[in-house]
Amino acid sequence: MPSPLTSHKFLALVGQAISSGGNFALGVLLARWLGVEAFGQYSILWMGVLFVLGLHQAYFTQPLMALLPSKPLNGQAEYLETLTGLQVLASVGIALLALLLYGLMVVFGIQADWLAWLPIMGFLLGGYLLQDYFKKYCYAKRELLVPLLMDASLFGLLLPALAVLYRLDELSLGHALFTMVMAYGISSSIGQLLIGGSPVKYWKRSNLFHTAKEHYHYSIWLLGTSMVQWFSGNFFLVSAAGMLGAVAVGALRMAQNIVGLCHVLFIAMENIVPTEAAQQFFTKGEPGLFAYLKRVGLMGSIPVGLLLIGLTLAAPWLITWLYGGEYQSFAYLVAAFSVVYALGYVLTILRMAMRSMHFTSPIFVGYLISAGLSILAAGPVVRQWGLGGVMAGLIGSQMLLLLVYVAFIWRKRTTKKLAQSPIMN
């Protein structure tokens, strides 16, 4: 009988506690040590990383979680090796593309404030996506010790290095980003070594094109969804950056970082539930899938709800203690983000259900509607109500998505029941 300390769920929670705790600490240290304006600049750059991460997860890791359980046992290893080859090529390609674009813009005399950050952000993005892939690879295979070690090495190197730079009075945004590039590169290399083998051998597989095509067909709606998803919520943040400045974006990122402690549970669910949900649907159909997700959703709602309420009540004290007095006036943003995350929890469960059923078009449609309204409303709302308008827009986007998802799922299940009815037959 396995020890509770090595059980699947325990390792998943510990791994996500390290990941979420490390990201939380990183956000706190950068906000406190860089200052609200430089931290706002970092947050704006990181929005670009999150945009590409959404595309990456739509094409690589979300299909991986859903497709692997349906593969025959003797074909799973080859599928994973081939997909790893594609991921390595993509990560290297992103870094080289960033260098190429930077060189072309310099040659043609194109000037922009963000241009100087392009090369280092390309390398950071390549390493970040590779690390994310190796973690999801291991979650799909239920090998949870490797992601835990990867995150432990990442933050075990990154946070002390930033502290040393700060103590030497050498910490700037550029130095912080370079340190992150090195830390993510080392963490990814550790993941590669622990799963075994050289990535070069993956490129020799004859079915690279077949796997790429399979993922494309599965993720076609998810890729579109990822793009419109980014605009659905982030367009309000983009408007805040353009109209309110980097300080406002830094304040929003600070509040989101506090509520982001919920990611310990959210990401743990994303790493465990989709594979099991796909298996339930594969073996028991829709009744088994919805019974499983209902049980998981109700169990998870208790710790999520208690955590959000606690963070909201403790927000003024937490902000002053963690970030300093200059952020204290933004405590109300924590309560607003708690509402966003509560709605996001319900949406996460519904998206898992739809992805398991390979019913991904409603996800795209929901985000498309939400993105369209966000683009139309963000400017006037943010201009009129400032940060309050940003938060109202984020909450409204989540509520609109909830209505769309529920309507699509209800319609699909009702249509199926009618088709199976003796009267219809």
Image (spheres, grey):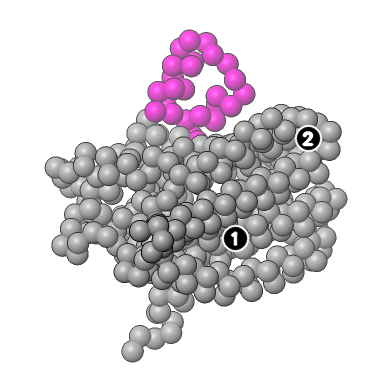
* Residue 182 horizontal/vertical position (percent): 45, 46
Look at mark 1 in the image and give the residue it sits on.
Answer: 346
Residue 189: image x %, image y %? 34, 52
The residue lying toward the viewer, choosing from 347 and 146, is 347
Circle 2 — which element? Answer: helix
Please state if 220 lies on the left or on the right of 311 as rendered: left
Q: Residue shown at 40%/79% (left/top)? A: 7
Q: Residue at x 54, y 14 (%)?
A: 110
Give the CA separation, mark 2 to mark 1: 26 Å
According to the picture, the residue beneath numbered tag 2 turns out to be 381
Q: In the picture, which quadrant includes the C terminus?
A: bottom left
Label pair 2/1, CB-CB below 8 angstroms: no
In the image, the segment drawn in magenta is 97-121
Depth order, front residue of 121/357: 357
Tell me the quarter of the picture where residue 150 sits. bottom left
- In the rendered structure, which disc, 2 or 1, sits on the residue that comes first in sequence? 1
Element type at marker 1? helix
Residue at the farthest top position: 108
Q: Residues within 10 Å of mark 1 (few under 14, many from 20)?
A: some
Is residue 223 placed above or below 7 in the rendered structure?
A: above
